[in-house]
Amino acid sequence: MAGFRAAGNGAKATVYDDTSESPARASADDERALLRAENDRLARRVAELERKLSLQPQTGLPTRFRLELELEELIEELSRGDDCAGFSLLIVQLGDAYTIVRKTLKSSVSEWILYQTGCRIAGLLGPRDRVFHTHENEFVLILPGTKGQELGAFLRSLSTRLSEPHIFSGINVAIKTATGVAYWPEHGRERSAILHHADIAAGSAVEARKSFVLFKPELLKRVVERVELQNSIIRAIESPALEKIGDQFVMYYQPKLFASAYEGRTLRIDRIEAEALIRWKHPTKGLLGPSTFIPLAEETGLILPLGKWLIYQCVRRLAAWQKEGRKSLALSVNLSARQFHSEDAVEVLASAIAASGLDPDKLTIELTETSLFGDPQAAAKILERFSSLGVHISVDDFGTGYSSLSHLHRFPLDEIKIDRLFIENLDGNRQDRIIVRSLVAIAKGLGLTLVAEGVERPEALDILWDMGCRGFQGFLMAKPLPPEEFTAFQDKIAAQGMVFTF
Ligand code: C2E
Ligand code: MG
Ligand code: MG
């Protein structure tokens, strides 16, 4: 353009214009080519991103992103037509065993499990069914037209197929799954509603340890109650209320009896210990057991101030018992996983012991298998620090988690407690008897004290005794008791010449 104006005459201007414009046109062409290349690059990048967003690399299955799109389309299509059969939406969650494998073994093992799970699910689907891999340990299925009995049959084959062991380079793991189901349109017409309701059903299946749960409106009510409870636990433990924590929380004590002889209905008692079990005196709901609020306290992190309070409480209580002359009485305190792994857990216990002048040899901390075996190396280090305080260490609910025998003997343990699940039906269930017998042998082999929890019936006590177990805790002996009732129980046994008759 500058050349054209400067030329002054047409012909010349044309020539001049031609020569002067060609670099300009060339640069415009270059620019267009550049733009086109950039466009293509962006389109490829978008396609690549879309592919990444659409496909889960470990399983090659469509992702949550695709699920949302396809679900929306399906709902639109079904809402327009008159196919009233609708569909079922299933959320399948892999159990704790998967998380433990992911944290403790090579990533190739967990990837293999995910891949196999995807294949196993796909193998069960009909031509109109869809499966998505939506989170690390979660799959979502859409089954058009499958409900009621037909769905029941599908769910049974799904859980059987998915719980078959995964075998990979010498490792053999079986993973339980929990599935939540919601029906479209019965349980929600909107995409978000049906996903939310299937999710609630899946949460309920996990909590109840069921392989599947169908959504029902009462489940929503329970979620609301849970949130209310969560809010009230926050109010009870948040800092302004901390000084008055003892107004709302109390400790109960359940006897653990160690016996040297058993005849008729009488146990000769060697020693009595106590396990401290927390209770919440809820302002409106009455006395609540720990299973209703400990998981909430864990989730919110409030277990840390609550746990600190209860450690001080228990240490003070034991020191007071020792001062009263109950020198032989030992006490166990439960530490939750989060509390055990918290930075100052050992310091809290050490300072509580120092402040009370307690003999630490009479204090035991109870830890669940999940606290220990999730990260065995880290757990071993913390355990050494606890152990150096002089307290004893017990593994609670033994047999339900994923103890690895190779780690068991490397931990500085003193006691294992057999979970009450194995004790409940000991006389009726052969498999439970086999497990308990091997736990007795493990404890003996490793020189550990063994306690059977949940001893409710004489039949269970008979079997446990014959197997060689000598430590018992359960309703047959006593329920968890307020402190003064616990000492009365202890005094009664002493008054009878250290025998307990039921
Ligand atoms: P746990 O440590 O395994 O405690 C034993 C549970 O079994 C107690 O339930 C006890 O009441 C119950 N139990 C004992 N004998 C029998 C029996 O013969 N039959 C039946 N059906 N149940 C029996 P509780 O008090 O509800 O405590 C449940 C769990 O909550 C405890 O299991 C423990 O894991 C946790 N917990 C309790 N107190 C505390 C605490 O102070 N801190 C932490 N972190 N967790 C606690
Ligand atoms: Mg316990
Ligand atoms: Mg237990």
Image (tube, grey):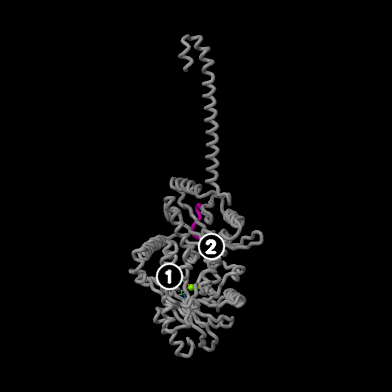
Mark toward the start of the polypeptide (2 vs 1): 2
Residue 225 is left or right of residue 97, and the answer is left
Q: Which mark is residue 96?
A: 2
Give coordinates of residue 14: x percent, y percent: 51, 12
- Residue 22 highlighted magenta (yes or no): no
Mark 2 crowd level (few <14, some 14–19, many ≥20, 10 Å Cα) = some
Question: Disc 1, ligand 1: is the CB inside 8 Å?
Answer: yes
Mark 1 crowd level (few <14, some 14–19, many ≥20, 10 Å Cα) = some
Give coordinates of residue 350: x percent, y percent: 47, 71
Q: Who's the residue at 48% across and 90% down the image?
A: 497
Give coordinates of residue 165: x percent, y percent: 61, 62
Check the image and name the residue furthest to the right.
170
Decide if residue 292 is in sight here: no
Decide if residue 499 is in sight here: yes
Residue 27 is left or right of residue 302, and the answer is right
Rounded to the nearest whole Å, what is the CA distance between mark 2 and mark 1? 21 Å
Helix, strand or loop at mark 2: helix
Identify the amino acid type marked 2. Answer: Asp
* Res 276 → quadrant: bottom left
Q: Give the range drawn in magenta.
A: 142-149
Which residue is the site of mark 1?
Answer: 290
Residue 332 is left or right of residue 58, and the answer is left
Decide: marks 2, 1 in contact (CB < 8 A)?
no
Helix, strand or loop at mark 1: helix
Residue 441 vs residue 188, the one in the foreground: 441
